Amino acid sequence: MAPDILSKLDTELQQEITSERQIVYILVETRKLLEDLPETDGFETLDFYCNWAVHRQMDRASAKALVR
């Protein structure tokens, strides 16, 4: 699955980013990659923004800790 996601991201990132739709798509696909990693240490901020793109409220402990 990861090679397919990477291919999609590569295609999208080759284009000029001009819309919110593109940003949301890129963040959602990136989130899928993060979910496949055995460990996400070091990617907490990226994970936060990927989740924020699809969730109106960030009320989990990890999100609250990052914002603090």
Image (tube, rainbow, N blue to C red):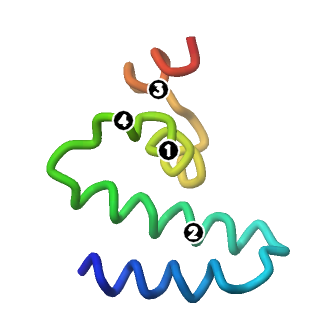
Q: CA distance from mark 3 to mark 4?
A: 14 Å
Nearer-N-terminus badge (1/2): 2
Tag 2 residue = 26
What is the x, y in percent for residue 42?
Answer: 36, 35
What amino acid type is highlighted by mark number 3? Ala
| SS label for mark 3 | helix
Q: CA distance from mark 1 to mark 3?
A: 11 Å
Which quarter of the figure is the C terminus placed in?
top right
Q: CA distance from mark 2 to mark 3?
A: 20 Å
Tag 4 residue = 42
Q: CA distance from mark 4 to mark 1?
A: 9 Å
Which quarter of the figure is the N terminus placed in?
bottom left
Residue 34 sits in quarter: bottom left
- Is the residue marked by circle 1 packed among few (<14), some (14-19), or many (20+) residues within 10 Å? some
Q: Nearer the viewer, mark 4 or mark 1?
A: 4
> Quick check: 29 left or right of 4?
right
Q: Assess whether mark 1 and mark 4 are in contact (beta carbons under 8 angstroms).
A: no
Nearer-N-terminus badge (4/2): 2
Q: Assess whether mark 3 and mark 1 are in contact (beta carbons under 8 angstroms).
A: no
